[in-house]
Image (spheres, rainbow, N blue to C red):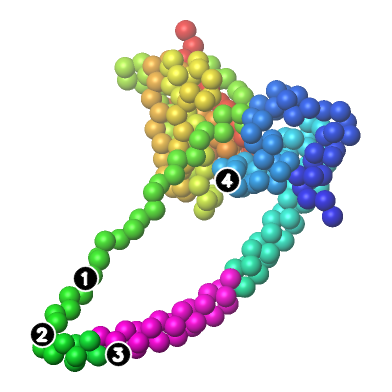
Amino acid sequence: MASLGEFLKSERESRGILLEDIAKETKISLEFLTALERDEFTGIPGEIFVIGFIRNYSKYIGINEEDAVNLYKTQKIEDDLKLDKIYQMNLKKRVIYRKSFWSILTIVFILVIIILFSIMRSANINKNIAVKKVVNSAGTYPVAVTYPMPVSTYSTKETVEVKNEKPKKGKLFLILKAEGNNEKVWLGYCYDEICKLSHDKWQSIFLKEGQRLKIEGKDIVGVIAGDAGFIRLYLNNKDIGVLGKKGEVRTKIFRNSK
């Protein structure tokens, strides 16, 4: 049975479609598209984006999106089982290795003691040997990793003109709240001049459920979410609902009307 990557590549090539064409239309980078066709899913930051890219890829080349996603999920389960089997085998090898290691180490230790005892006796050494045990209490901590912003993510974009909604000092305030999802939700956001730049120049962050992010801009504020259904928006302290549907990658720009 072909893997997901092999299946996608075969369907694409049979239709005479280039990866560059898909990248141009879906705004998914060639790096991520190549990773999909090679089944290198760890090269894509987050399962939400993997599934989103599979859907957009499948939709563009004209194959059933759900079939492709189900193939990915089945393959992931099989890969996890293989990794677990490999882990168990390696664990058994480690146990055997450790037993052999400690047996050899014990024999070597005994031989060293015998040799040292013989040398000390023959040389008539009578010294006290103080043994100091050095304890290292320093801990090792993992280094935090920041995922690059998946700037080429295909998304639905909407611009909203805000009328008579200027609070104090004539600024726009947008609060983003993550809700209904135990996993992290990726967000990109902008304000004023930054919103005029490409998405790769926007700032990005991961929010956990219950966390909030406040964006303040003079004329423009914007947001792009990896899973729009889990982000609730508050514009100038008013609840305006969730950003979009669950599983949807969505961009929304709020602009003060002049």
Spatial separation of the CA atoms under disc 1 and disc 3: 25 Å
Q: Mark 1: give few (<14), some (14-19) or many (20+) Cα within 10 Å.
A: few
Q: Are marks 3 and 2 in contact (CB under 8 Å)?
A: no
Q: Position of residue 91 (x, y in %)?
A: 56, 73
Of labels 4 and 3, earlier in sequence is 4
**Quarter residue 237 falls in:** top left
Of labels 1 and 3, earlier in sequence is 3
Residue positioned 45% across, 85% down in the render: 103
Spatial separation of the CA atoms under disc 4 and disc 2: 63 Å
Foreground disc of the pair 2, 1? 2
Spatial separation of the CA atoms under disc 2 and disc 1: 22 Å
Q: Are marks 1 and 3 in contact (CB under 8 Å)?
A: no
| Amino acid type shown at disc 2 | Lys
Q: Mark 3: give few (<14), some (14-19) or many (20+) Cα within 10 Å.
A: few
Q: Which residues are magenta?
A: 90-116
On the image, numbered disc 4 is attached to which residue? 46
Foreground disc of the pair 4, 1? 1
Of labels 4 and 2, earlier in sequence is 4
Q: Position of residue 5 (x, y in %)?
A: 75, 44
| Amino acid type shown at disc 3 | Ile
Q: Nearer the viewer, residue 24 or 168?
A: 24
* Residue reaching furthest to the top: 258
Q: Which mark is residue 114?
A: 3
Q: Secondary structure beneath disc 3?
A: helix
| Amino acid type shown at disc 1 | Val
Residue 234 appears in the rendering: no
Foreground disc of the pair 1, 3? 3
Residue positioned 52% across, 33% down in the render: 149
